[in-house]
Amino acid sequence: MRPDDIRKVLRADRFVPLRIGLADGRSVLVRHPDQVFVAERHLLIGLAGLECSEPLMTPSTGDRVVKDWMIVNIVQITGIEPEKGVNGKANVRRKRSK
């Protein structure tokens, strides 16, 4: 993946939260494009926190202040996919009760 390809995804007219897959099996949920800095060989990703019990994600869209950050080598990115739902919340349709 090239830095320009990543920039295009992050700067799309209508940004959709996305998940960046990493070679070590982890993934990072990106909720806002301003929380990712793209360099020639690395991404600097601002995180809501770096705790083992929580999935890696950027702060919610209303909170732009990061609590931690990580550097990802671009060659370690296995894929970038849109996240289901808004702000990483799964779209769940509930059945109507009769």
Image (tube, rainbow, N blue to C red):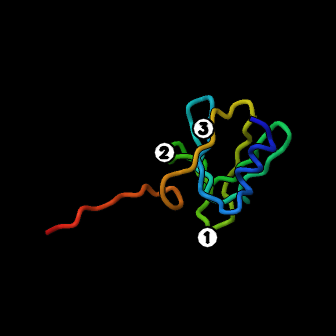
**Observer-nearest residue: 53 or 14?**
14
User: Label 2 neighbourhood size at 10 Å, few (<14), some (14-19), many (20+)?
Assistant: few
Indicate the quadrant where residue 72 lies. Answer: top right
- Verify CB contact (< 8 Å) between mark 2 and mark 3: no
Q: CA distance from mark 2 to mark 1?
A: 23 Å
Q: Which residue is mark 3?
A: 21
Q: Which residue is mark 1?
A: 62
Indicate the quadrant where residue 97 lies. Answer: bottom left
Q: CA distance from mark 2 to mark 3?
A: 18 Å
- Looking at the rendered structure, the kind of residue marked 1 is Gly
Say what secondary structure mark 1 lies in: loop
Where residue 15 appears, x then y in whole percent? 65, 60
Instruction: Name, please, the residue furthest toward the right.
Output: 40
- Looking at the rendered structure, the kind of residue marked 3 is Gly
At x 71%, y 57%, the residue is: 12
Residue 53's disc is 2
Please identify, in this view, whether the residue under mark 2 or under mark 3 is nearer the observer.
3
Where residue 66 appears, x then y in whole percent? 68, 59
Say what secondary structure mark 3 lies in: strand
